[in-house]
Image (spheres, grey):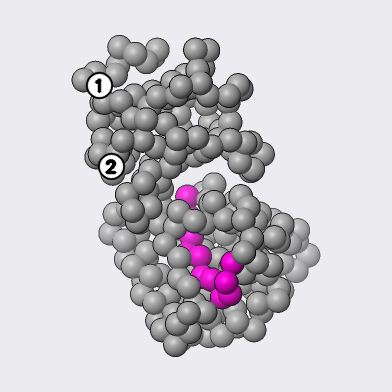
Amino acid sequence: MDTYDVFICYQHKAKKVVDFIVEALERAGISCWYAPRNLDVEGAGKDRQDVISKAISNARCVIAVISDEALESLWVKADICHADDYNIPIIPFEIAPISVQNELTLRLGIRHKIVAYENPSTSIEKLIRTINGILSDEDSGSLDSNKALSNEVGTRGQYSIMQNEKGDIMIMMDARVGNPEHPRFIYDGSGMALLYRNPESSVSFKNIDEEAREPLKSVKDVLVVEILNDDVEREYLVPVRIVKDINSLIIQ
């Protein structure tokens, strides 16, 4: 399967809008994968969901065409979660006002979105600039702003450290057993950190990317979101405590 610049994720009612987007992007030299066009060609005689999953994995970024119907679509959720799991940059492209609030809203809310319905004449141009910025950053090896600041393997499963435009930091990780009690996030500015959840549960974070270290030192608290089966199990605000050396607090 070929590599594409963009995978476009949408709910079928937005097909005409997506056709217009694809035409504009490909006219600008940005290669696109979207169903049913590419699926009909590449999916003949194959499991269609496998083909879609591979197309997402091979894309350099994903455009999520967002409406209330899209946010409630299980197929859209599966596509976005797959892209998120593979740390593929996602660009939310809102084509209508949003009233739905769910787990997808949380996943997409930390990313820089394009509100297309407010300025339809300039939204495609902004989308093209955003995509080209992602592609050029990827080619140069730098970290893209739509990606998490850090996506490494901790003591249990994958975690993500993300920052929004206001500088707030959110940490997404696998859900743990038991509710937090007076939690604290302990950090010394290195590649390691410790989340104290309760007297019987602590989580160590290892291999924190350098891009995430200064932001973590500069905030007073972080939002921790625990995920179970692709849904939010719990979320809570945790104060950050800066220490001189965290190594003595983490069991190696």
Left or right placement of residue 147 versus residue 33 in this view: left
> x and y percent of residue 119 in the render?
45, 82
Q: CA distance from mark 2 to mark 1?
A: 15 Å
> x and y percent of residue 74 in the render?
72, 57
Q: Could you say which quadrant of the image residue 98 lies in?
A: bottom right
Instruction: Name the residue nearer the viewer: 179 or 90.
Output: 179
Disc 2 residue type (three-letter): Pro
The residue lying at 57 percent from left, 59 percent from top is 56
Q: Is residue 37 above or below residue 105?
A: below
- Image quadrant where one finds the N terminus: bottom right
- Image quadrant where one finds the C terminus: top left
Left or right placement of residue 206 versus residue 84 in this view: left
Q: Is residue 5 visible?
A: no
Q: Could you say which quadrant of the image residue 112 lies in?
A: bottom left
The label on residue 243 is: 1
Residue 178 lies in the magenta stretch: no
The residue singled out by tag 2 in the image is 215
> Decide: marks 2, 1 in contact (CB < 8 A)?
no
The mark nearer the N terminus, 2 or 1, is 2
Instruction: Name the residue nearer the viewer: 200 or 89.
Output: 200
Left or right placement of residue 246 versus residue 14 in this view: left
The residue lying at 32 percent from left, 49 percent from top is 167
Q: Which residues are magenta?
A: 87-98
> x and y percent of residue 72 in the render?
69, 60
Disc 1 residue type (three-letter): Val
Name the element at disc 2. helix
Q: Is residue 13 visible?
A: yes
